[in-house]
Amino acid sequence: GAVVSQHPSWVICKSGTSVKIECRSLDFQATTMFWYRQFPKQSLMLMATSNEGSKATYEQGVEKDKFLINHASLTLSTLTVTSAHPEDSSFYICSAAVVAYGYTFGSGTRLTVV
Amino acid sequence: GIQVEQSPPDLILQEGANSTLRCNFSDSVNNLQWFHQNPWGQLINLFYIPSGTKQNGRLSATTVATERYSLLYISSSQTTDSGVYFCAVVASGTYKYIFGTGTRLKVLA
């Protein structure tokens, strides 16, 4: 139980285009989901918290206009990287809190912008 | 904000050896988890352990919340244990998981 499905697993896009990453909770409802970013050989950094039906809360230094987050239902949160540039290339991973279990994570999306 | 430091940053072991990974945090926490990140980037939940001791096979973990640290023990290490180990905490009064600096483990055959 407590599975979060994240798609796509990897994506290559051209500079200037937008990419959407989906995160679905398969067997539970996720009122809140979290989006992290990880550069090579570094730790995971929290980007934003998405709440179902309301605006996301972004961490300091994260551009909200570049990283659009939508949490339209209790089982789906999306992260759209707009006008992607090579410096946006990274590993993006979502997570959701599960009562008495802790946090469960999606399998991650490796984004490469060329 | 809370600081989460892990040690050692890098560790190389011979197969069969035991090891202890440490996670220190600078403030009181409500939650703490240990994860193993495999070479493909996937985070595998090892333990949800805000306090106390748990064991799962060759792995065990102990969190002493009052002293602000947690330990992950790996016994009889195998090459498949290689990867990066992270602890992550939720500081008291918050709801966000903050990840530690990680320990990169390599187990040699």
Image: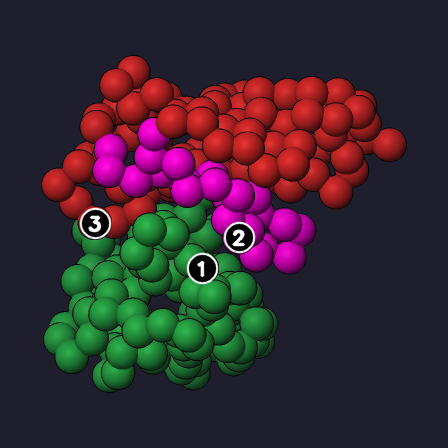
Mark number displayed over residue A79: none
Residue placed under numbered mark 3 in the picture: B95
The residue depicted at 58 percent of the width and 72 percent of the height is A10
- Which badge, 3 or 2, is on the more N-terminal residue? 2
Residue placed under numbered mark 1 in the picture: A105
Task: Assess whether mark 1 and mark 2 are in contact (beta carbons under 8 angstroms).
Answer: yes
Q: Quadrant of the C terminus of chain B?
A: top right
Magenta span includes B87: no
Percent position (x, y) of residue B96?
A: 25, 49
Residue type marked 1: Phe
Classified by dominant secondary structure, the portion drawn in magenta counts as: strand
Q: In the image, is residue A51 above or below residue A53?
A: above
Task: Give residue A54's quadrant in the image.
Answer: bottom left
Percent position (x, y) of residue A87?
A: 44, 61
Q: Is residue B52 visible?
A: yes
Q: Which residues are magenta?
A: B29-51
Q: Along the line of sight, which residue is nearer the eye, A77 or B69?
A: B69
From the image, state the color of chain A: green
Percent position (x, y) of residue B75?
A: 68, 25
Residue type marked 3: Tyr
Q: Which element carries disc 1, helix, strand or loop? A: strand
For this view, does A1 lie left or right of residue A28?
Answer: right
Q: CA distance from mark 2 to mark 1?
A: 7 Å
Q: Which element carries disc 2, helix, strand or loop? A: strand
The residue depicted at 16 percent of the width and 79 percent of the height is A53
Question: Chain ID for label 3?
Answer: B
Q: CA distance from mark 3 to mark 1?
A: 15 Å
From the image, state the color of chain B: red
Q: Are marks 3 and 2 on the same chain?
A: yes
